[in-house]
Image: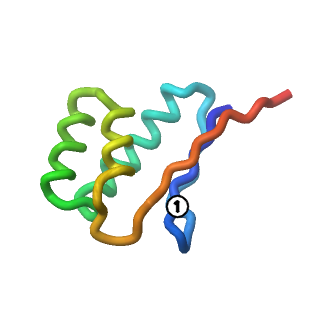
């Protein structure tokens, strides 16, 4: 099971889990698409949208979490959890 948590210093913003890394990437990218215009400066947001539209989900999420944010900095933590 692949899991992801997106958080600020003060709160958990988003939690998700998926059976595959590709599905986890898709779910995190959906969150990024919904948040990017409110969280990043316009030039950075446009670049993230362009990457998402091109199907470059990991590149888009990497930029989203590394770009200068307007509000609280968000962080992404991922892990693979083995199930029995």
**Mark 1 surroundings: few (<14), some (14-19) or many (≥20) residues within 10 A:** some
Q: Quadrant of residue 58?
A: top left
Give the residue pinned by disc 1: 7
Q: Quadrant of residue 41?
A: bottom left
Q: Residue at x 28, y 27 (%)?
A: 55
Position of 82 relative to 6 (above/below): above
Q: Residue at x 44, y 60 (%)?
A: 74
Position of 14 relative to 16 (above/below): below
**How is the model colour-coded?**
rainbow
Whether residue 72 sits left or right of residue 52 in the image: it is right
x and y percent of residue 26 in the render? 43, 34
Mark 1 residue element: strand
Position of 29 relative to 54 (above/below): below
Q: Residue at x 46, y 34 (%)?
A: 25
Q: Quadrant of the C terminus?
A: top right
x and y percent of residue 12 in the render? 56, 64
Q: Nearer the viewer, residue 65 or 55?
A: 65
Q: How many marks?
A: 1
x and y percent of residue 71 in the render? 33, 71
x and y percent of residue 1 in the render? 68, 32
Whether residue 62 sits left or right of residue 77 in the image: it is left
Q: Residue at x 54, y 74 (%)?
A: 10
């Amino acid at each position: 099971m692949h899991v992801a948590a997106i958080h600020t210093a003060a709160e958990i913003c988003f939690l998700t889990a998926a059976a595959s890394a590709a599905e986890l990437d898709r779910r995190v990218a959906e969150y990024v698409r919904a948040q990017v215009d409110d969280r990043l400066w316009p030039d950075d947001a446009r670049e993230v949208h362009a990457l998402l539209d091109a199907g470059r989900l990991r590149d888009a999420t990497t930029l989203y979490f590394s770009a200068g944010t307007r509000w609280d900095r968000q962080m992404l933590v991922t892990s693979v959890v083995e199930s029995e």
